[in-house]
Amino acid sequence: MENELLIRCTDICKNFGATRALINTNFELYRGEVCGLIGENGSGKSTLTSIIAGVQGATSGEMFRNGAAYAPANMVEAQKAGVAMIVQEAGTLPTVDVASNIFVGNYELFRKHGFLDKKRMLQEAERILQEIGADDIHADMMLGDLNFEDRKIVEIARAMYLNPEILIIDESTTALAQKGRQLIYRLITKMRSENKGIIFISHDLEELETVCNRITCLRDGVMVGNLEGDQITVANMRPLMVGRELQGNYYRADYDGTVSDEIVLDVRHITSENGYIRNFSIQLHKGEILGFGGLSDCGMHEIGRMVFGLDRYITGEILHVPSQRKIKSIQDAISLKMGYVSKDRDNESLILNASIQDNTLMAAYKKLERMGLIPPDAEKKLSDHQIEVMRTKCESGEQYVNQLSGGNKQKVAFCKWLAADSEIYILDCPTRGIDIGVKAAMYDLIYRFKKEGKAIIMISEELPELIGMSDRMIIMKDGEISAEVMRDQSVTDTQLIEYMV
Amino acid sequence: MRKKLTNFGKAMILPLCVYLLFTVLTKGAFGSPKSMLAIVRTSIVPILLGMALSFGMTMGMWNFASGAIIYAAAIFSANIANALHLGIPGVAIISILIAVVLNSLMGWAYNVFRVPCMVLSLGFAMIYEALPNLLTRDFTGKIKMADAYLADMPWCVIIVLIMFLIFYIIYNHTTLGTNISAIGANISIANSAGVNIDSVKFFSFLISGIFLGITAVVFLSVNVSVIAVTGFASCSMIFDSMMGIFIAAVLAKYVNYCVAVVLGIFTIRMLGTAMVAMGMSSQMRGVMTGVFLLIVLVYSANAGLLDGLKKQKAIAQSVNCELKKEQNIL
């Protein structure tokens, strides 16, 4: 019974366009196992578990559950097959009660003579909440009245009500305080004693060391190793997560991290609206690539947004030093020749239902304006020039952006700020979801910006990219700077990860 | 129980304020029992229509063809029932059937063509408005004066009570109602949890059709004769109900949504009647109704703003204190 296989994944591949998120990944989970999945951001951990939980399908490969082929079409099918998942992001229904949240998609279970047996549904919800140790949350409470942690606990109850044999916990503890974490740990202990299986994703290596009895590591979509028993230590996990040579030579070749003394942006004691980032200060120099790294919830993305005026800050100031003007809004930032490429490219950087030309010129109309009018030939000329510079693969500038590949969309997002002659670039995950070829072009461009004396803030979830491109690396943890590392040949992924986790 | 009563009291503040304000302004004329009874009677059609619209609006779907369906159902049912001598029961059954067919057809088209409901319903509104003009001789649906009893007391109230009970049960005690609420709360989570979105939406059109059919009968009873309209004129009849539903979304924080819908629409009707009692022109009434709605919605949308600003101020103060301490140490 102890070593009975719960699930086997064989040669799982998952492609997102040109990006290969999982490459022939094999994974097994046995009864009584708490398997920690580790790996850098983008290593494929969440992709693999989401395939197991029925959130998305694999491009190829097979899964077997209790010896039979297993290919859930959605989360409900997976849940019915005994696989449940608690995800990182909040996924609750705020305007309905706790019971309706727990049983969403399964109200049929409580149908009696054509009507919903609300009383039984509430009783059942209360039972599950008590079972998982959340006695202070009641089934008839409105979800919107609960705090974030309690909402997360309701999600846990939702995952648990069909009594799953496999529970996937995807970085959920990150979002939880002590109460929620303890609840999850109790659940893990209970499930383990019942000979069930848990797949546990966390960036907290100490937590994994305590909780797991097996560690599996993914790197760039490939399973690279396992740790068991006494081998499970933080010291052993770190080298397993990294240890990669830079693939190809597409980062900048020099290791000269010296930059001009001239400061272009002075961020002084800023605090985000929710107080997660407090009293944060940094200076950006002319011709500098300032890299920001850390786990996805470390606050680095928020810094980028505040510097560009997208998010408000409630203390301090952001000063554009050459003009001595303060940046308080997007308009301020753009007028000071700043550009921002968002991590959420399709929603925040591009208008998908508009042409390449319209997207490219969005921030450059002022430049093209002649006596209040914009000459069409000047529009076309500038747009075509940018297409040529970036080698964007398209039919013409009139082609709609939604018809382009991810890499070419990203090129258009860059073009927008190139066309506006931006001097300061804030690039949030500039190579996210694009193939190696386009990545190389982007790195080339970023390096060219630097050489031209432009200043770049590069926020990245990929350590090789951060090390390969930055003059200076700011590593963040829990909304604060945990380390500042200068460009040097000796900087390694392992070193940075220590500051991150 | 005490919390429920307190919340009910909170939900009643808005209609009570409207009542008291206009009773004072009209020196008691508006607040008289006779006047209130008249408001109840004029609220019947908007409340029935509001219940019909609620199913879709909860899920973010705006049905601008509802008015046209009511006109078509009223005119056709009157003509068919008259021809077959079926009386008011016949009018009711035929009206419900027609409204269900017309609204379900729209629901089917919505699922097949994936056009936003607002756009789709405007297209269907044009078609459904044209149907009585094309298919009836005098573009009119008439019933005998003696058959118009459904618009009188106590029938109109009985109909509303029965329909409210059905509305309440569907919303709170059926899987369809709970699925509608789940979709309205977050469609992507409901979808990933296995709620059949297309099916729920289609059935919401179908059920809504029953309510529209009943509304059409009462509408016909109130007017005795209903003449076909064109050029989206039918849309005007849905606005009181829609505004009432907006208010219901605010009141639903305190009372059951179904009760909130009735309270919201009744408040809007009270406001309209009160302004008439004050002798306001129709233009002024429109302006005042709009301003009232804006005040309620702006208050609701920004209810958390003040708290948020207070929190931000506290965070800023603590950060500045930390900073001063650091600077003093240095």
Image (spheres, helix red, strand yellow):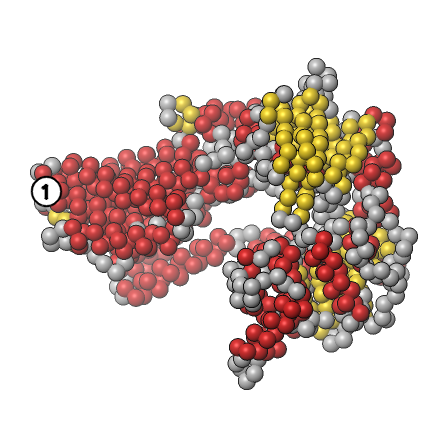
- Reply above or below: B9 against A233: below
- Which element is circle 1 on? helix
- Tell me if A481 is positioned left or right of B184 in this view: right
Residue that sits furthest to the bottom in the current view: A371
- Tell me if A475 is positioned left or right of A405 in this view: right
Image quarter where the N terminus of chain A lies is: top right
Q: Where is residue B79 in the image (x, y as percent from the top left)?
A: 13, 45
- Residue at numbered disc 1: B82
Q: Where is residue A20 in the image (x, y as percent from the top left)?
A: 68, 45
Q: Position of residue A415 (x, y in %)?
A: 64, 66
Q: Mark 1 lies on which chain?
A: B
Question: Is residue B47 in view?
Answer: no
Q: Please give the name of the residue rendered at 67% of the width and 23% of the height, measured from the top-left corner.
A: A6
- Tell me if A13 is positioned left or right of B107 in this view: right
- Reply above or below: B98 against B243: above
Image quarter where the C terminus of chain A lies is: top right
**Which three-letter amino acid code belongs to the residue tagged 1?**
Asn
Q: Please give the name of the residue rendered at 36% of the width and 32% of the height, measured from the top-left corner.
A: B169
Comparing B52 with B262, the one in front is B52
Q: Please give the name of the residue rendered at 83% of the width and 72% of the height, measured from the top-left corner.
A: A262
- Callout 1 environment at 10 Å: few (<14), some (14 to 19), or many (20+)? some
Q: Where is residue B293 in the image (x, y as percent from the top left)?
A: 40, 57
Comparing A222 with A360, the one in front is A222
Total marks shown come to 1
Residue that sits furthest to the front in the current view: A395
Question: Is residue A478 in view?
Answer: yes
> Residue A366 falls in which quadrant of the image?
bottom right
Residue that sits furthest to the top in the current view: A1
Comparing A349 with B13, the one in front is A349
Q: Please give the name of the residue rendered at 71% of the width and 32% of the height, measured from the top-left corner.
A: A26
